[in-house]
Image (tube, rainbow, N blue to C red):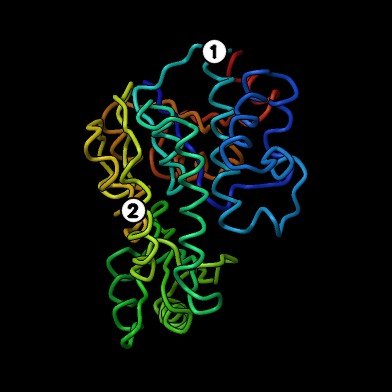
């Protein structure tokens, strides 16, 4: 059984999607559709944008989504492969919803452009932070965050794989949690180069604004269930999509549980569609024996088709 999985923020790189767009008209069309929807040249941003431009959250989110869907269209055209489930890490859940047919690509790319802007504007630069903590059990880290908060916000934001958890909140509280994690024997505890404390309670203003944007967006029927970040369970009810996407802004990404759930349901083959191969590495640590393949170029597509 196969699942398609889609990357989130952090997977971006200059040049992403260029190879596919130059070789497959269906991929080129996706970039053109995104540029029309957004009113600027997103192909130029993805193919030749600077690291700083691509790191801006309002750019990162539509750029990764567009590259992922361009790769998806090529996979669909060239292999005919159909997933039993789709899932994505944070932003990647939007790609999964496009894959399932619940959201149109044109709607999704406009939504994530706004989502990125809302998330960036929710907290002044420098006030919030995120950090990766390696080698501390989830329950222990949650207790350390409560101790480190001291009236501020800090809590787990991404449960990526066993022993790899990202925390988010006020920068001062995150720094206190880093020190406590080191004292508790963390293998590594380091700040992440991100511009906002994603998936924390500090994102509530962004969640409210996203809720308003989603109000008028049509949601279609699912061709396959999507395993969502908030519940780490498959869903295919169109009436639940908007609520789950709004909750996801502040809720932790339960990626480890999502992959474990897909494995429990019988998924053995995971195709990571879009830039980078972060998810493939995490999946191998979560679901022992899982087969992973990553698609973001002509060369990687040939491996899948072969």
**Residue drawn at the location 44% of the way across and 77% of the way down:** 174
Dot 1 alpha-carbon crowd within 10 angstroms: few under 14, some 14 to 19, many 20 or more: few
Q: Distance between the residues labelled 2 and 1?
A: 38 Å
Percent position of residue 148, x then y: 36, 83
What secondary structure is marked by label 2? helix
265 in relation to 258, above or below: above
209 in relation to 74, above or below: below
Which tag, 2 or 1, sits closer to the chain's start? Answer: 1
Taking depth in this image into account, of 223 and 277 the one nearest to the observer is 223
280 in relation to 302, above or below: below
Dot 2 alpha-carbon crowd within 10 angstroms: few under 14, some 14 to 19, many 20 or more: few
Left or right of residue 103, residue 68 in this image: right
**Residue drawn at the location 56% of the way across and 67% of the way down:** 195
Percent position of residue 39, x then y: 63, 42
What secondary structure is marked by label 1? helix
Q: Which of marks 2 and 1 is in front?
A: 2
Label tally? 2
Give the number of the disc on residue 79: 1
Q: Residue beneath label 2, please?
A: 212
Residues at discs 2 and 1 in contact (Cβ within 8 Å): no
Taking depth in this image into account, of 8 and 281 the one nearest to the observer is 8
**Residue drawn at the location 35% of the way across and 30% of the way down:** 102
Taking depth in this image into account, of 23 and 278 the one nearest to the observer is 23
**Residue drawn at the location 30% of the way across and 29% of the way down:** 225
Give the number of the disc on residue 130: none
Percent position of residue 273, x then y: 54, 32
């Amino acid at each position: 059984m196969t699942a398609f999985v889609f990357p989130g923020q952090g997977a971006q790189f200059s040049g992403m999607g260029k190879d596919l767009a130059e070789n497959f008209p269906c991929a080129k069309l996706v970039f053109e559709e995104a540029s029309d929807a957004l009113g600027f040249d997103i192909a130029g941003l993805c193919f030749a944008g600077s690291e700083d431009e691509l790191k801006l959250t309002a750019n990162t989110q539509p750029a990764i989504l567009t590259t992922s869907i361009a790769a998806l269209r090529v996979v669909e055209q060239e292999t005919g492969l159909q997933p039993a489930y789709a899932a994505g890490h944070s932003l990647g859940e939007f790609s999964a919803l496009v894959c399932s047919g619940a959201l149109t690509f044109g709607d999704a790319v406009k939504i994530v452009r706004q989502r990125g802007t809302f998330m960036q504007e929710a907290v002044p630069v420098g006030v919030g932070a995120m950090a990766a903590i390696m080698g501390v059990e989830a329950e222990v880290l949650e207790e350390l965050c409560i101790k480190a908060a001291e009236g501020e916000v800090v809590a787990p934001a991404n449960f990526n794989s066993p022993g790899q958890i990202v925390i988010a909140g006020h920068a001062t509280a995150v720094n206190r949690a880093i020190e406590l994690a080191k004292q508790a024997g963390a293998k590594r505890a380091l700040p992440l180069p991100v511009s906002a404390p994603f998936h924390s309670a500090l994102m509530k203003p962004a969640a409210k604004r996203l809720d308003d944007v989603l109000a008028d967006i049509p949601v279609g029927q699912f061709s396959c269930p999507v395993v969502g970040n908030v519940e780490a369970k498959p869903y295919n009810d169109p009436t639940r999509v908007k609520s789950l996407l709004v909750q996801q802004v502040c809720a932790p990404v339960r990626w480890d549980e999502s992959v474990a759930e897909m494995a429990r349901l019988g998924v053995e083959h995971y195709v990571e569609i879009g830039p980078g191969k972060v998810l493939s590495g995490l999946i191998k640590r979560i679901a022992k024996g899982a087969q992973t393949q990553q698609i973001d170029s002509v060369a990687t597509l040939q491996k899948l088709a072969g």
